[in-house]
Image (spheres, rainbow, N blue to C red):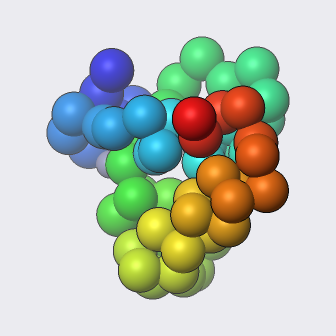
Amino acid sequence: MTCCKCGKPICHDEAGLTCKLINRGAQEYYCYDCLGQIFHTSRRKLEEMADDFRAAGCTLFL
Ligand SMILES: [Zn+2]
């Protein structure tokens, strides 16, 4: 999988976060950096968000 904006390879968490933040059925995924630009937040904040979802048992982040 690659980021649909910058073409960088993305990890599982980045794909999961795209689903959460943009659209559950997303076919295009964004890396942390591009998600940060879209949502005006930092990469660190997004990583924390992914950790929170994982802690909550979200199946997108297993
Ligand atoms: Zn990107």
**Residue 49 drawn at (x, y percent):** 62, 68
User: Which sits in the foreground, 27 or 57?
Assistant: 57
- How many marks do you count on the picture? 0
At which x and y percent is residue 16? 59, 38
Q: Quadrant of residue 24?
A: top right
Above/below status of 24 relative to 13 = above
Give coordinates of residue 2: x percent, y percent.
Answer: 30, 27
Residue projecting furthest to the left: 8
**3 w.r.t. 26: above or below:** below
Residue 33 found in image quarter:
bottom left
Residue 6 seen by the camera = yes
| Residue shown at the point (58%, 59%) measured from the top left | 50
Which is more toward the observer, 48 or 33? 48
In this view of the protein, which residue sits in the foreground, 16 or 22? 16
As drawn, 59 above or below 40: above
Q: Is residue 61 left or right of residue 5?
A: right
Quadrant into which the N terminus falls: top left
Where residue 53 sits in the image (x, y, percent)?
71, 56
User: Is 1 left, or right, of 35 in this rendering?
Assistant: left
Q: Is residue 17 left or right of residue 43?
A: right
Q: Which part of the image, by quadrant, shows the C terminus?
A: top right
Q: Residue at x 46, y 45 (%)?
A: 14
Quadrant location of residue 23? top right
Q: Residue at 79% across / 56% down in the picture?
A: 56
**Is residue 38 something one can see in this rendering?**
no
Residue at screen point 40% across, 59% down: 32
Asked if residue 55 is positioned above or below residue 18 in the image, the reply reads below
